[in-house]
Image: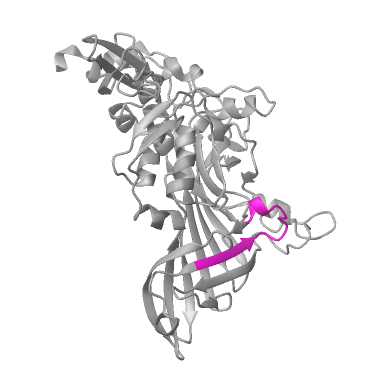
Amino acid sequence: MPEGIFRAGHFELRDLILISSSGKEVDLTVSCVNITIFESLDQQCVTGELAVMDSVNLTSMFPIIGQEYLKMRLTTPTIRNKDQMIDYTKNALMVTHIDSKVDIGNGSQGYIINFCSRELVVNERVRVNKTLRGSFSDIVKGIMKNNLESGKNINVEPTADVKKIVAPNIKPLSLIAECTRQALSSKFNDPCYVFFETTKGFNFRSLSSLYAQPSLITYEDFIQGTKTKKGAVDVEQDMRGILNFSIVESQDTVYSNMNGSYGSTLYTHDIISKSYQKHIYNYLDNFDKEHHIESTNSEFNGDKKRDYPIVSNSIISKDNKRISDFPGRTYVVPVNGSGTDNSQADEFNSNVFTSYRPQFTLQRRNSQMNQLNSGFIVNLIVHGNTAIAAGDIVDVNIPYTASTKTPRNELYDNIYKGKFLVSKIRHDFYPLDKSHVMNVQVVKDSLPESLPSGFNPEIVDDNPIFNEEVF
């Protein structure tokens, strides 16, 4: 049994201090019933809520008015690395409001204290109204430091190109969101940047960078409470066990066709030369040129594996077209054909800044980000572990369930196995019994094995959808 931990999901609440707008402090470790923390790739800042049982009417006597600071520190007992703890003692959270206040009898009341990262509050009262120069990665670091005044760890992946942005009185986080849509990784040549906060800090990184991380843990289904040879409960094995799971979503081909995930057309219009270019994006043709979770992870972790598209390359029409040969979305974007932003010059009056080049980012980013949001998604309920955060890579093995066995007698589902990206986490801490449970959403944009493909002329000929007389 690991030292300091008695069961899977055990945690320690080391600090929970509420600081009023006047500077008074109150320790909530005894009155806290539940702590919930949310982190997500879709969420720029961490949010959460604190359930409190109060017998001294802090909401009025303290008082709690939504302008308080909250210092918090929690950890899984076996963890010694401070970077893997949830520590908000130096960078306090901010209370936003109180809700669900009820009388629970015996002179006590219960209520929910809602909180968020300080940067989210600062973002609402600050505007960026200046000229910013440099790469997108430099610009993001500057915004976090100078505008949001963040003292947290910021993991920024270097970007290509040199930019000059005139910020038109815009919120800092809105400007960062615009940077993510245009940034291109200098290492991976990947346009799929995301900006999000976890309990470990902020991240401005491409999907390729996230995919290249080593897997932190393998989650699989097995009987909880399994014992070691010495007769003790195998806590490490319990930590990897799936308490419950649900298949949230798989590819919706109608929606994915409509939003251009499988194919799109981009027209770039150069107003200077009065010319335009047509760019076709084809998911199946471009798949091996892009970074996807299985192959990228194996490439950077010493295990050469390839991955496969999440749709079949079967012929689906009489003119021998596949699902990706039908561009479902059209973009029309003005560009500068030279690639240099002629409207922006440096202090020497030289045009050194790169213009927007959507032909390298727009279609591919749209496809891969849509796959992330509507790909193969699984919700897992597992024992809590403060070392796991949104943006991490985990292995997941969902059991194969059927009344008949496959020819290879697989233990795990062919689709829902292998590498997954953690896209969302809901941490639930229960101080009364010191238990920590996580609701983890994981997603993948590729498969470890290819999908079956082929062409059956009898099915096509007999299907009225391919009968020209119908039209």
Residue appearing at x 67%, y 59% in the figure: 76
Q: Could you say where residue 226 lies in the image, as x and y percent from the top left?
A: 73, 56
Quadrant where the N terminus is found in the figure:
bottom right
Q: What stretch is highlighted in magenta?
A: 70-85
Kindly tell me whether residue 453 is visible in this rendering: no
In the image, farthest residue toward the right? 230
Quadrant housing residue 249: top left
Q: Could you say where residue 87 lies in the image, as x and y percent from the top left?
A: 60, 59
Answer above or below: position of 328 versus 411.
above
Residue appearing at x 23%, y 20% in the figure: 465
360 horizontally vs 342: left or right: right
Answer above or below: position of 100 versus 77.
below
Kindly tell me whether residue 20 is visible in this rendering: yes
Q: Would you say residue 249 sits in the magenta stretch?
A: no
Q: Return the residue nearer the eye: 45 or 139.
A: 139
Quadrant where the C terminus is found in the figure:
top left
153 horizontally vs 227: left or right: left
Answer above or below: position of 58 versus 237.
below
Residue appearing at x 27%, y 16% in the figure: 268
In the image, farthest residue toward the front? 348
Quadrant housing residue 120: bottom left
Query: How many numbered tags mark residues here?
Result: 0
Q: Could you say where residue 230 lies in the image, as x and y percent from the top left?
A: 85, 57
Quadrant housing residue 459: top left
Q: Return the residue nearer the eye: 274 or 451.
A: 274
The scheme the figure's colours follow is one colour
Q: Could you say where residue 355 lies in the image, as x and y percent from the top left?
A: 35, 21
